[in-house]
Image: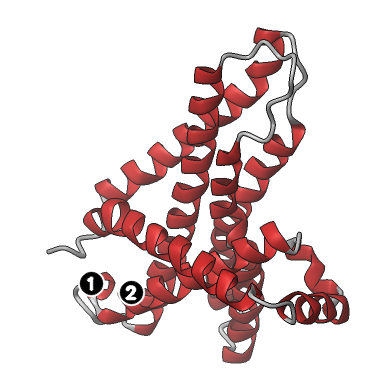
Amino acid sequence: MAEIVLVVVGAALLNVYAAALVLLRGPLFHTRVYRPMVLNIGLSLAPALIAVATIVVLLVVATMSPQPWLVWLVAILGGIAWLLALPNSAYLITELNLSHRREGESVPLWYDIVLVLSLAMSGVINSLVSVVLVQAAVVLIALPNDDSPLEGPLVWVSAAVLMTLTGFGIYLGRHLRFNSWDVVRPHRMVAKTARHFSQPGTVGTAAGFTLVHAIFLMCMYLVVVAPAIGLLG
């Protein structure tokens, strides 16, 4: 438990550090604050906040009105919202292209390198924390009598599936410019996605992009999350 708390605290500090670098960049070097980065930091925190809010509501509903259909309704709605928002966290990896730099700015390259690295890693860690929160909630509910519920195959399989979906979500966000809230216009999303993947080579590109990002996220899961929750024994 203490290890998980340290991961969460570390994630919070990394987010604060990344946000500070973004906000201080303007006044320190007499240039504008790159507002899309500030927005992306907020969006990267959304999945974890949705997960926490859903767990809290589930506990309240289960305590005050323990009707199975209501509990399932909250879980399903919260789960869908969380899954749609999940790619927003790891999407910060795409900030590593340094596209925010403008000709004539006096910002040192070393500053922007640390900035985008901190930003990208904060997104990755936010994604991992969000996933482990949901995994913990699910396995503790599904396996209440298991002495080591976070050490079973369900955790590994779910992590692999979620990282793959996250990788594909990042692709949709980067190449098709989709946002989580575009789901309210499903016909537009379907039409745009169909047009995109009808172009030669896009399926292979999307598969490669998704696989590379999913493997990277699983490696980070192995390094950061697995030791914290005892998956390595």
Query: Which numbered circle lies on residue 155?
Result: 2
Q: What residue is shown with label 1?
A: 151
- Of the residues shown, which amino acid type is indicated by label 1? Glu
Q: In the rendering, at what x and y percent does residue 190 appear?
A: 80, 81
Determine the CA span between mark 1 and mark 2: 7 Å
Q: Is residue 34 left or right of residue 142?
A: right
Residue 217 occupies quadrant: bottom left
Label 2 residue SS: helix
Residue found at the very far front of the displayed protein: 200
Tell me what residue is drawn at x 53 percent, y 72 percent: 165
Name the residue rendered at 81%, 67% in the picture. 182
Task: Mark 1 and mark 2 in contact? Answer it, CB < 8 Å.
Answer: yes
Q: What element carries label 1?
A: helix
Give above or below for 125 relative to 82.
above
Classify 112 as above or below 190: above
Can residue 134 be seen here? The reply is yes
**Three-letter amino acid code at disc 2?**
Val
Q: Total marks drawn?
A: 2
Q: Note whether residue 50 is visible.
A: no
Is residue 65 placed above or below 166 in the rendered structure?
Answer: below
Q: Residue at x 32, y 41 (%)?
A: 6
User: Residue 97 location in percent, x, y?
Assistant: 59, 40
Query: For this rendering, which residue is in front, 128 or 94?
Result: 94
**103 and 227: which one is in front?**
103
Rate crowding at label 2 as few (under 14), some (14 to 19) or many (20 or more) other CA atoms within 10 Å: some
Q: Give the left or right position of residue 215, taking residue 52 as reference.
A: left
Q: Quadrant of residue 80?
A: bottom right
Residue 95 screen position, x and y as percent: 60, 41
Q: Quadrant of the C terminus?
A: bottom left
Task: Determine whether, in the image, residue 219 is placed left or right of residue 200.
Answer: left
